[in-house]
Amino acid sequence: MVGLGCSASAPHEAPPVSVLIVVVDTLRADHLGTYGYPIPTSPNVDALAAGGAKFTRAYAAAPWTYSSVASLFTGLLPAAHGAVLPGLVKNEAKDPVVVPLGADFSTMAERFAAAGFQTALFARNGYLGHGNEQGFATYENPKRSRAADQAKRAVAWLETVPTATPFLLAVHMMDVHVPNRPTSASRALFPAIAALADEERDRVERFRVRFGGADDPAGAMFRTRRTAMYDASIRDVDTAIGRLLAGLGERRRNTLVVITADHGESLWDHDELERSLYSDPRRLRGVGHGQAFFEEVERVPLIVSLPGAIPPATHSEVVSLVDVLPTLLEQLGLAAAENIDGRSLVPLWKGAALPGRPAVFDSVCFGRDKQGILEFPWKFTRSNAEPDLLVNLDDDPGEHANVASLHPEQAARLAAALDIELARSRARGEGLRSPSVSGVVPALDEHEELKELGYVE
Ligand SMILES: [Zn+2]
């Protein structure tokens, strides 16, 4: 909830700036052209990034939808907002429950609504509910909806908003999440799947295959095809983003656009390391998301575009999705959010330095509870009853060498820093939460949906 109203009017005659935020579920940064991917997955996003602020070290606060989106929408880490799966081992039960995002927390949509914005969320993932939807006057979350349909619905909604009224439009697209069912137009761009028979394609729309190590030819082919299915799905989402941007029409000049993701996806990047460190109730290794904090899952795209107001630039500071809310509030001149974990990134384009700050990772949804911290280049992850993981992203950007035992002093320093960050965040959450709010709710309505999302067998 939001206690204070505030004015959205700018000091000059220009109409108030609106916001379009697109969250592409499961989109790792490094599979977009603008982040260096050599395959043309993302022409529309690349063009948008060329004219905006692009963050090359932006991190999700959690490696799965529910907790990560709650952090994006509240500016709080999971330790504060508590929208998590409870328990020391996650998702062992067939019917997982989540702690709902408390009504006490002020969300992005509530803050914008209080400032006179019209608000809408077009989603297709049960985890956008359970409190993540609070504050959106229009909220659609059907079980089946492609990015293309969502873009159409969102543009139709835009047409109902009077031109003088600012809006916050959030679209959460699921096409890049398994099961990947790219359109034939996008498949045609990827030779590994362009001519695949339907039944073969059905096999590779998910990651549920168990094969031998890197030398297994069947495994290598499966991996190539699955990666192409993932990439072709990005292409579909990119096309939908292009339609959304076009649908802004005249309003584009006055709409701040954010493109990001709630987390990325493992495509066998750390098969061996995961096997050696972690247990997973699904008995999967190196695929999907939610079980670890490797770069392919935690490093997300973050592009912020408002031509004329935000200069095009590439920013390599470590930032977190908890920073998005305070950045939007400052850029639009709305009341700042007090006592949150994130901080505004606006100083970066106002020519001011922003002191370094670590990114914190928390709230896994598979396997043993874990927390992590990145103070570039050191990244440290600890888990209850599993080994510590320390990597140096400068020496080892692919995160293949666990140097925790080689650099115990770094591991100890980061563990202490992590304790401080988590304690601070937890205290923040306790200050914001009403003590009477507690309890858990079933994570998703139907077993079928959990299955579809890859959360249960
Ligand atoms: Zn997600």
Image (tube, grey):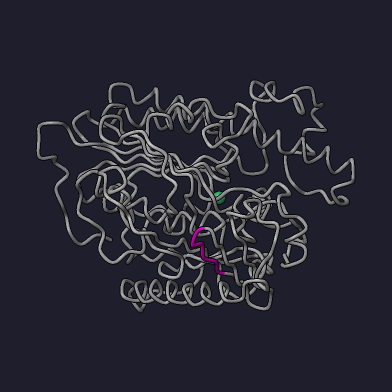
At which x and y percent is residue 229? 70, 34
**Residue found at the very far left of the displayed protein:** 12
Residue 107, by quadrant, is bottom left
What residue is at 44 percent from the left and 39 percent from the top?
A: 259
Give the position of the N terminus as an image quadrant.
bottom left
Q: Position of residue 60 (x, y in %)?
A: 49, 54
Query: Would residue 25 appear left or right of 451 to someone viewing this image?
Result: left
> Would residue 363 appear left or right of 140 to someone viewing this image?
right
Q: Which residues are magenta?
A: 371-376
Along the line of sight, the residue nearer the viewer: 216 or 282:
216
Quadrant in which the C terminus appears:
bottom right
In the rendered image of this protein, does residue 88 appear above or below residue 105?
A: below
Residue 35 part of the magenta-drawn span: no
Q: Residue at x 60, y 26 (%)?
A: 40
| Image location (x, y in percent) of residue 16 | 19, 36
Q: Nearer the viewer, residue 74 or 354?
A: 354
Q: Percent position (x, y) of residue 38?
A: 63, 30
Query: Taking 40 as reference, is 426 above or below it?
Result: below
Q: Is residue 315 above or below residue 105?
A: above
Quarter of the figure with residue 134: bottom left
- Magenta-highlighted stretch: main secondary structure? strand
Residue drawn at (64%, 49%) of the image: 453
